[in-house]
Image (tube, rainbow, N blue to C red):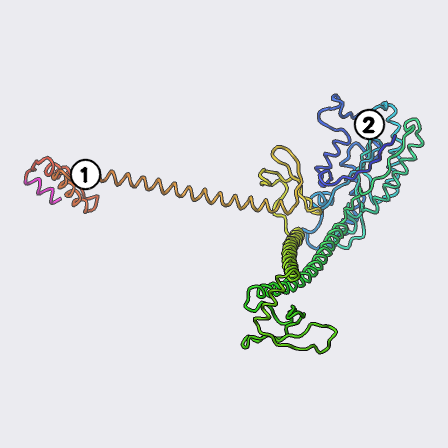
Amino acid sequence: MQVSYTFHISSKKNAITTTKKLSSASKHNLRKYSTPRNRTGHYDSDKIVQLAGTDNLFRDVENVYHEQFDQALADYNKKQKRVDRKILDYMRYVSQNEKSDVAVEVIIQLGDREFWANIPESRKHQMTYIFRDQLNALRQHLPEFVIANAVIHYDEDSPHMQVIGVPVSSGYKRGLSKQCSKTRVFTKESLEKLQDVLRERALNGMEKNPKLFAGVSMKPKEEGRNFDYSKEFYIQRKKEEYKKVERDLDESRHTLSGIKEETAKANEKLSYMTMELTRKEQETFALVPFHQNDVFPVQGKMQKVLSIDNDCRTVLMCEDDPATYYPAKHSYPLALAQKSFFEYMYSGIGLQQMRENTLEAEEARREQESKRREMETERQELIVLKEDISSLRQDVKELSDMPCPFRMGDRFEIDGEMITVDYIYSYSRTVSCRTDMGQEKEVSLLNAIRAYNTYLHKGELTEECRSLQQRIDDLKAEWGRRTQMVSEVDTVWNVFRHFPAIKEFIFEVGRLLKRPFEKVQLPEVVEVFKEKVLGMQAPEHERTRSRSR
């Protein structure tokens, strides 16, 4: 039976990037939950063994920060002339930096769930010696990783040790001379060496516990599991990808050059075949069916056409004998030459040769057409390849230059569903988000930025449409109110325009109102109403007095 050995480092969504995540890790490692969960059988604070640190993991990490960075922080602040550039709390400063981890958690486990399922609880505690030896080896071979707290969990399916420490790197010329840097401490080379040492120490521990690991061996180390967190490795990998694209492009150019040469040859051959076909057609349908240098029998001898005189209707020919250097020349009438030519062409030999020439021409035409189609297909594939290469270069440039317009906690739409941004990984150019259904997913930063810009543009158009719709509704309401007012005025006028007395009363009141409003007296209006509407005449002295007023 073989058991596995695992060595994990916190990364991506499990990375301890803020003090809040450090508090959550402390609560989990030391089993400090507000509601005891050991009654459900999941966690039990009595089944953990603490190998390093205290029962306050947060304070242990703070002490490491003070021990490692206080002197460097004081030297840095002395050099700063501006108060706003001084750093008061380096741990809080690292927590607010999205590109750094406050601490790193290492999980070491020997054996999987199937192996530990049938092991009694009392024998599981024999792993304490092996885990303690693993912790000492970690301190010895990676001193840059300062351990703050280490705990063994025996309350889960498989015993494992969780170590939390601070990666300390020195020699910086900018900022603090000593800084917290996960990428410098945990490189691909350091991880490979460390895993080899820890696996060997774990194998020695298994040999010293034959009762627990009787007949058990360790599985071989799997390849390709170590990951380099450094920025240099990321840049190197991108350069290799770019070189690969360049090699593919060079091969495509070479292939294109070969295709062009083949195309030129094929065009030349096509031109030649076209000329031959044209000549054959002329031979078949023209008045003179043969041409210069044609060979056919005349008067029982194979003769070659030297020239054709259409004016004299004669043909100059010579005997086609390779052994004769100066063959005799003969002039024949054109009619005789035509008759001899047609007899030869429609004889067995001539007809067979004509058929062979026709089939050869047809076969050449088909071959040329097939090659032309193949070259067109290859040309289209080359165009698509160029477009893909151009798109890849543009994506690489956008990924390296495009700033991130959103922050953690922002909400927008991706692929038709609303998501909430949990964390932005700048070094891997990815975004960790969560849908409204609680499903976690990771998308590339470029796709997230495009979706975010599309969502903002969509919101602006919606707001503008709402404003225009509100304006249209207000105009419709104003138009209705004014239409109703005009209708009411028309109704009043249509009623009173048939009563002359009322019209005169309205005109007279209008005349009175042309004076200042405060000089118009109610008795005057009443008097006009009685006179114009009711037909009652007031006494002369009262009318005179009213007018004088």
Q: Mark 1 to mark 2: distance in Å?
A: 101 Å
**According to the image, label 1 marks what residue?**
494
> Residue 508: where, in percent of width, then height?
14, 43
Question: Quick check: is 481 in the magenta stretch?
Answer: no
The three-letter amino acid code for the residue at tag 1 is Asn
On screen, 189 above or below 133?
below
Of labels 1 and 2, earlier in sequence is 2
Residue visible at 17% across and 40% down in the picture: 521
Give the number of the disc on residue 200. none
From the viewer's perspective, is 209 left or right of 228? right
> Residue 194: where, in percent of width, then height?
86, 42
> Residue 319: where, in percent of width, then height?
68, 73
> Residue 485: where, in percent of width, then height?
27, 39
Magenta-drawn stretch, dominant element (helix, strand or loop): helix
Q: Disc 1 on helix, strand or loop?
A: helix
**According to the image, label 2 marks what residue?**
114
Snapshot quadrant of residue 353: bottom right
Question: Quick check: is 541 in the magenta stretch?
Answer: yes
Instruction: Give the magenta-colored segment's residue range.
Output: 540-549
Q: Disc 2 on helix, strand or loop?
A: helix
From the viewer's perspective, is 406 left or right of 50? left
The three-letter amino acid code for the residue at tag 2 is Glu
From the viewer's perspective, is 186 left or right of 12? right
